[in-house]
Amino acid sequence: MAVNGAAGVLNALWCWVLITQGRKHRSPALVADGRHLLTDVLTSVGVLVGVGAAYGTGIAILDPAVAVLVALNILWTGWGLMKESVGGLMDEAVPAVTLDRIRNVISAQADGAIEAHDLRTRCAGKVTFVEFHLVVPGGMSVADAHDICDRLEGALQSEVEDARVTIHVEPENMAKHSGVLVLTP
């Protein structure tokens, strides 16, 4: 039991490193490895608690009762890891809070444009893809539209780490005026 406890402490430290670094580097694989190891740590703790409680109290049922709780934790963690893995494979959209930050940046940095629409985001590994259509006045020069796009791209890359931005410029007759991010003048 002492060896099990010592190994549990070492594994707990290692899973903390894996999860922390995985989140820092936006690596689902490292986070999953850390969470898997955390489940092993909790299993070890469960064994110690179950055996210790059964031995200390003389109530033999405590060991299998704790084992059931440990098994439920393993199933719950496995379900969460599968759900996150499928989300990563499906290139999930950014979380709502990040989408709000993206919308605010577009609204604040798009001076000279009329509107933005068809905003789409997705995450693939540590890269966040941001794509949208930007409507500009029909008489605007290509150079002026390009300057707006450069400003937007730079601001989005500053706000969202590892962002890859694609902006499709459209003339004002392509404005949708419905379900769009209307830009302030």
Image: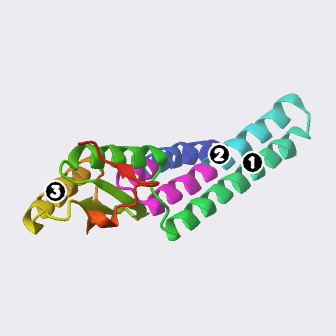
For residue 148, the mark is: 3
Please tell me which of labels 1 and 2 falls first in the chain: 2
Q: Which residue is mark 1?
A: 70
Q: Is residue 56 visible?
A: yes
Q: Is residue 35 above or below residue 120?
A: above
For this rendering, which residue is in front, 117 or 54? Answer: 117
How far apart are the two marked residues, 1 and 3, measured between alpha carbons?
A: 56 Å
Q: Is residue 164 visible?
A: no
For this rendering, which residue is in front, 141 or 72? Answer: 141
> Which secondary structure, mark 2?
helix
How far apart are the two marked residues, 1 and 2, measured between alpha carbons?
A: 7 Å
> Which secondary structure, mark 3?
helix
Instruction: Identify residue type, mark 3.
Output: Ile
Where does residue 183 sit, x and y in percent of width and height? Answer: 30, 47
Instruction: Identify residue type, mark 1.
Output: Val
Q: Residue at x 90, y 32 (%)?
A: 58
Where does residue 100 sit, x and y in percent of width and height? Answer: 40, 44
For residue 42, the mark is: 2
Contact check, label 1 and label 2, Cβ < 8 Å: yes
